[in-house]
Amino acid sequence: MIFTNLFGLMILVFLAWACTQLGADDKAKLGYALVGLTGMLLGWGCGMYFAPYGSELSKLLTIGQAVSAFASGYLVSKVDRFVEASLFPKDGGILAGDWLGAAIFAAAFLNAALVVYSNRSYFREH
């Protein structure tokens, strides 16, 4: 468990460093950091959802049903158009900055989800 937390912290430090190195200016660096923070917060929520404590189970199931109904309908249709327009432009060019942002989001999301899930799975309420 300690290694999971240390490894998660190392990844977090690397992502913070990557945000400072990948951004061309302060605005881009802040944008990458915001994308990473958003990924971490969503990953944290997903980690909590998939490893609930007994007292949270009914609340998280209700919230999960509401979120999945929203995500499966409205959100997927809007996100699909956004991703298509921003990551796959019609002129055929590849937008490296947008792909880097997507990679930072995915890494931060997975890092937070795995660390929270493993901590909550091993340290259950008794």
Image (cartoon, helix red, strand yellow):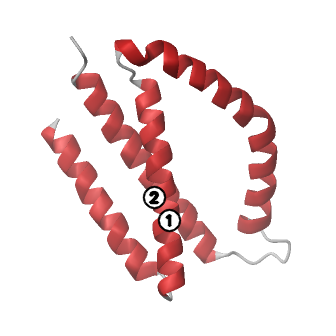
The residue lying toward the viewer, choosing from 32 and 67, is 67
Q: Would residue 104 be visible to someone looking at this image?
A: no
Q: Residue at x 38, y 45 (%)?
A: 112
Q: Which element type, helix, strand or loop, lies under badge 2? A: helix
The residue lying toward the viewer, choosing from 49 and 24, is 49
The relative height of residue 55 versus residue 32 in the rendered view (above or below) is above
Residue bearing the label numbered 1: 34
Amino acid type, mark 1? Leu
- Residue 100 x %, y %: 54, 69
Q: Which element type, helix, strand or loop, lies under badge 1? A: helix
Q: Residue at x 53, y 72 (%)?
A: 31
Q: In the rendered image, which quarter is residue 5 located in?
A: top left
Find the residue positioned furthest to the right: 90
Q: Residues within 10 Å of mark 1 (few under 14, many from 20)?
A: some
Q: Residues within 10 Å of mark 2 (few under 14, many from 20)?
A: some
Marking on residue 95: none
The residue lying toward the viewer, choosing from 10 and 57, is 57
The relative height of residue 64 versus residue 77 in the rendered view (above or below) is above
Find the residue positioned furthest to the left: 2
The reply to whether the C-beta atoms of the residues labelled 1 and 2 are less than 8 Å apart is yes
- Residue 91 x %, y %: 84, 78
Marking on residue 37: 2
Q: Residue at x 81, y 55 (%)?
A: 81
Is 81 placed left or right of 65 in the picture?
Answer: right
Q: In the rendered image, which quarter is residue 77 located in?
A: top right
The residues bearing labels 1 and 2 have C-alpha atoms spaced at a distance of 5 Å
Amino acid type, mark 2? Leu
Q: Would residue 63 be visible to someone looking at this image?
A: yes
- Residue 89 x %, y %: 80, 71
Q: Residue at x 44, y 55 (%)?
A: 107
